Image (cartoon, rainbow, N blue to C red):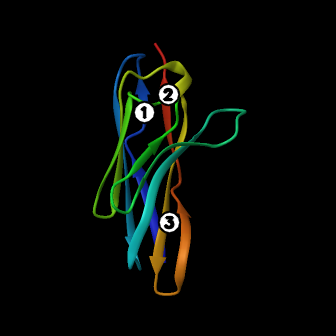
Amino acid sequence: QVQLVESGGGLVQPGGSLRLSCAASGSILSINAMGWYRQALGKQRELVAIIVRGGATNYADSVKGRFTISRAKNTVYLQMSSLKPEDTAVYYCNADIETGWGSFDYWGQGTQVTVSS
C-alpha cells in the first residue's frame, strides 16, 4: 500500500508565496514521476508541474517563472511565488510509483490554496 500525504496549503494574499509538500510512503520500489495538479471550483483538474526520474521538469504555461517543483527522495515540493487569485484551487499531489506488484498512479487527498486579499 502507498500513501501520499500533502501539506502546506492555506490562505495567502496576492503576490505572496506558499510551499506545498507531498510525502510518499509505503511499499515503494521506485518513483517514476511526481507532480502537482489543481482543480478550481467548476473547472477540470489540470497539470501544474511534474518532475520525472532524472530531474526533468515540465510546467503549465500559467505558472512558468512563478512555481518551482523539486523532489528529495520520496517527497515532492511545489514552491509557489507571485501568487494570483486565479491560482486558487485544490492542489493534488500525484505519483507514478513502482511497487512489488506493478506500477501504479497514486493521488493525495488535496490541499486548498486560496489567494485573496
Which of marks 3 and 2 precedes in the sequence?
Answer: 3
Percent coordinates x, y for residue 47 in the rendering? 56, 44
Marks 2 and 1, how far apart at CA: 6 Å
Count neighbours of disc 2 (C-alpha within 10 A) and say few if under 14, some if 14 to 19, many if 20 or more. Answer: many
The residue drawn where x is 46% and y is 52% is 35
Is label 2 or label 3 in front?
3
Q: Which circle marks residue 10 in the picture?
A: 1
| Residue 106 vertical position relative to residue 81 in the rendered view, above or below | below
Residue 82 quadrant = top left
Which of marks 1 and 2 precedes in the sequence?
Answer: 1
Residue 39 quadrant = top right
| Residue 101 vertical position relative to residue 110 in the rendered view, above or below | below
Marks 2 and 3, how far apart at CA: 27 Å
Callout 1, which amino acid? Gly
Which of marks 3 and 1 precedes in the sequence?
Answer: 1
The secondary element bearing badge 1 is classed as: strand
Q: Residue furthest left?
A: 72
| Residue matched to label 2 | 114
Percent coordinates x, y for residue 97 in the rendering? 47, 71
The secondary element bearing badge 2 is classed as: strand
Circle 2/circle 1 CB separation < 8 Å: yes
Callout 2, which amino acid? Thr
| Residue matched to label 3 | 96
Percent coordinates x, y for residue 111 in the rendering? 49, 43
Q: Residue furthest bottom?
A: 101
Q: Nearer the viewer, residue 102 or 43?
A: 102
Callout 3, which amino acid? Asp
| Residue 25 vertical position relative to residue 69 in the rendered view, above or below | below
Circle 1/circle 3 CB separation < 8 Å: no
The residue drawn where x is 33% and y is 64% is 74
Marks 1 and 3, how far apart at CA: 26 Å
